[in-house]
Each structure stands twice: as C-alpha cells, then as structure tokens.
C-alpha cells in the first residue's frame, strides 16, 4: 500500500541538508506501522512525500501502486483526497466551521451534495462519541473532542491509508490513551493502512511494526511483541 525505494530528499543548494538518505520502506495493506525518531530525523519528510506534498530528490514513492512523481499537481491532489486521511497533532480544524461541517469538508471537495455529506459526517461523529457536539465549533470543544473531530474527518471518506502525525502530542496522558484506544478500534473496523508518527513508545506499541529513524535513515526495525516490553528486531 505504501512503498518508498531508495529515497533521498535534499534541501538547499549551497549547503545541502540531507533529510532522507537512501530510505526504503514497505507497508502492506491493513498494516499498522509506527515511525519513531528524534526531531529532525526525517519523520515529517516521510509523511510529506507519502501525501504528495513534496517530491523526493531521487528514488520512488508509491501509494496503492501509484508512482506519485509521475502525477501532475492536480492528479496528486486528487490521489491525496481519495486515498489518504490525515490526523494532525494540532487538529487543523477550520475555526469558523462546526464539527459536522469540518468532517463533511473532504466529501464536499469530492463534489458530493451537502445533504449527503452532512449525513455521513453526523454518522461518523456519533461513532467517535460526539453525537451531541455536531453543531459546536472547535473553540467550544476540549482538546480530546477536537482530536475526535479530526479523526472523524480523516475517516469520513473511508480512505485506504490513514496517516497520524503525533495525534496525542497536544493531549494529556488520560485523553491521549482514549484517543489511542479509539484509533485501535477504528483501524479494526475500517481496515485501513495506518502509518503512525510518534515520539511515544507506548503509542507505537499499538502497531504491528516500529521503524526508528535517525538522520534520515532507518536505524532499527522490528515487529512489536505485545506480550513483552519493547519490540523484536
């Protein structure tokens, strides 16, 4: 579902910064994979490449068999809207829209009628426990509620790929655990491929595999042993 092969990403011309160095990774359909590493290790660059928001300096990036570098800007945007749901640390909700309007926005961008989009948005908001918050704007909700809205927005069009960028980073530990449990449940229900970027080892252990990045390279990779702490190389 997600495949990066020999990917380099460089920034700058006179003083080149190597954000990624010969990075290869493959994520199967329905798999849950966590990407860990310190700030500056290349985690955000990986997400931007998978989303088609950036292009590799060299190497191949494919999602669902599609080589993103071969697509024009419009086609990349369309692929992102149809195939990738994003969950952000900072929620990225539009402050002037209600919960149901924020969630229905991806469907509206695909050209669906407003009545249909809001019905589907209301249904998934109920699924994430926000049936009574549909008409509330982000500033009228707690951080945990805003993240639930963001999760509903990411899943409302049933994307085959779900990217979560530090989704518990702005939440207290209790609320963060609730969000992780919700993501685990929704992954089972929707059978999406989940790529989870996090600094939190507890969050990473919910996944099937963990990839550890440092200086743009994978330095450690292994499957999670859910019966023992850590993971097996």
Image: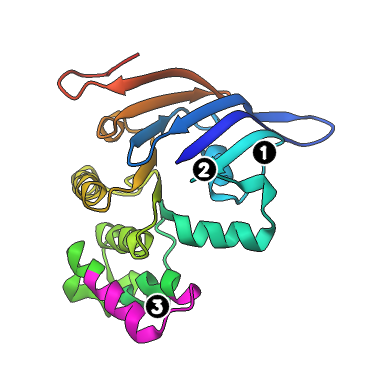
Q: Residue at x 58, y 23 (%)?
A: 215
Judge left or right: residue 186 versus residue 221: left
Which circle marks residue 56 in the picture?
Answer: 1
Extreme residue in the top direction: 233
Q: CA distance from mark 2 to mark 3?
A: 26 Å
Q: Which residue is mark 3?
A: 97
Q: Position of residue 78 (x, y in %)?
A: 56, 62
Q: Does residue 162 appear anywhere in the picture?
A: yes
Q: CA distance from mark 3 to mark 1?
A: 35 Å
Tell me which label, 3 or 1, sits earlier in the chain: 1
Please name whichever residue, 74 or 204, is drawn nearer the observer in this view of the structure: 74
Q: Which residue is mark 2?
A: 47
Which circle marks residue 102 in the picture?
Answer: none
Quarter of the image for residue 30 reads: top left
Quarter of the image for residue 141 reads: bottom left
Q: Position of residue 55 (x, y in %)?
A: 67, 44
**Is 109 in the magenta?**
yes
Q: Position of residue 202 (x, y in %)?
A: 25, 31
Q: Dot 1: within a 10 Å radius of its alpha carbon, few (fewer than 14), some, or many (20 or more) residues?
A: many
The residue stretch that appears in magenta: 108-123
**Is 162 in the magenta?**
no
- In this rendering, which labeled residue sits more in front, label 3 or label 1? 1
Judge left or right: residue 207 versus residue 10: left
- Mark 1 lies on a secondary structure that is loop
The quadrant of the picture occupied by the C terminus is top left
Position of residue 45 relative to residue 223, above or below, is below
Q: Position of residue 39 (x, y in %)?
A: 51, 32
How many numbered tags mark residues here?
3
Q: CA distance from mark 2 to mark 1?
A: 12 Å
């Amino acid at each position: 579902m997600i495949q990066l092969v020999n990917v380099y990403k460089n920034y700058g011309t006179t003083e080149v910064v190597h954000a990624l160095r010969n990075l290869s990774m493959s994520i199967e359909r329905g798999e849950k994979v966590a990407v860990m590493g310190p700030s500056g290790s290349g985690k955000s660059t990986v997400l931007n490449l998978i989303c088609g928001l950036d292009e590799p300096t060299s190497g191949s990036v494919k999602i669902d068999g599609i080589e993103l570098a071969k697509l024009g800007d419009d086609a990349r945007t369309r692929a992102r809207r149809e195939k990738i749901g994003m969950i952000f640390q900072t929620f990225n909700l539009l402050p002037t829209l209600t919960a149901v309007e924020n969630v229905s926005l991806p469907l509206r961008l695909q050209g669906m009628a407003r009545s249909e989009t809001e019905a589907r948005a209301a249904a998934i908001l109920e699924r994430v426990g926000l049936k009574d918050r549909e008409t509330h704007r982000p500033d009228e909700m707690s951080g945990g509620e805003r993240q639930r809205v963001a999760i509903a927005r990411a899943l409302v069009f049933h994307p085959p790929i779900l990217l979560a960028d530090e989704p518990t980073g702005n939440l207290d530990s209790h609320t963060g655990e609730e969000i992780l449990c919700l993501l685990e449940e929704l992954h089972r229900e929707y059978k999406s491929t989940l790529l989870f970027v996090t600094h939190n080892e507890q969050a990473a252990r919910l996944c099937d595999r963990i990839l550890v990045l440092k200086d743009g390279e994978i330095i450690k990779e292994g499957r999670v042993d859910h019966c023992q702490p850590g993971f097996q190389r």
